[in-house]
Image (spheres, grey):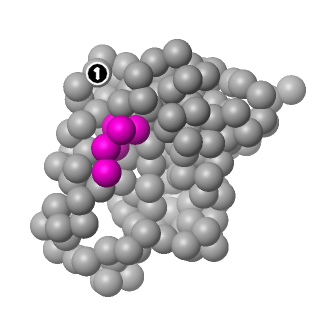
Amino acid sequence: MSNISVKVQTFLENHSLSALEFEPGSTPTAETAAQRIGVPVDQIAKSILFKGKDKRYRLVVASGDKKINSGALKRATGAKHRMASAEETKEATGFLPGGVCPWVCPFGLADRPVAILLDVSLDEYETVYPAAGTDATGVPLSPDYLQQITGGMKVQVT
């Protein structure tokens, strides 16, 4: 039985995608996801939710081995940011941190006021693996298709 929500599963199916599924709790970080999927950690598309001083949420999706540069994020958005709390993440995205991509999943956010920023570090690979709303999934797709289906803006914030 799949632990992927119906909403996310429907989104994946509507975009001709399918998730790799593993034992619950087996991919909560970029490192564990990479080990489980069998790819380098930089092929994992980790997502981190930030809250700007302008009160807007931004989901940054970047290669799993990269760190987000706060100055670059401010230059890209015009606002200073902090990492969103667990409660803010659940409220803004519908997902719990630590359980998806590895913190937040870029899928299923069309009805949420969250801007999606796709770091150019993702473009180093033909295939990247964001999560599908759980701490035990990975969805293989190209960075360009990720941008197309999420409406994300390409930025350099790592």
Res. 121 image quadrant = top left
The residue singled out by tag 1 in the image is 125
Residue 17 is situated, as x and y percent measured from the top left of the image, at 54, 22
Residue 28 is situated, as x and y percent measured from the top left of the image, at 62, 42
Q: Is residue 63 magenta?
A: yes
Residue 96 is situated, as x and y percent measured from the top left of the image, at 65, 58
| Position of residue 41 in the picture relative to residue 24 (left or right) | left
Q: Is residue 56 magenta?
A: no
1 to 49, vertically: above or below? above
43 to 88, vertically: above or below? above
Whether residue 30 can be seen here: yes
Residue in view at x 60 percent, y 57 percent:
97
- State the residue in front, 40 or 119: 40
Residue in view at x 55 percent, y 23 percent:
35
Residue in view at x 54 percent, y 52 percent:
103
| Position of residue 84 in the picture relative to residue 71 (left or right) | right
48 to 30, vertically: above or below? below
Residue 138 is situated, as x and y percent measured from the top left of the image, at 56, 28
Residue in view at x 50 percent, y 38 percent:
30
Span of residues in magenta:
62-67
What count of labels does the image hold?
1
Whether residue 150 can be seen here: no
Q: Principal SS element in the magenta part?
A: loop
| Position of residue 86 in the picture relative to residue 109 (left or right) | right
148 to 19, vertically: above or below? below
Disc 1 residue type (three-letter): Tyr
Within 10 Å of disc 1 (Cα), the crowding (few <14, some 14-19, many 20+) is some
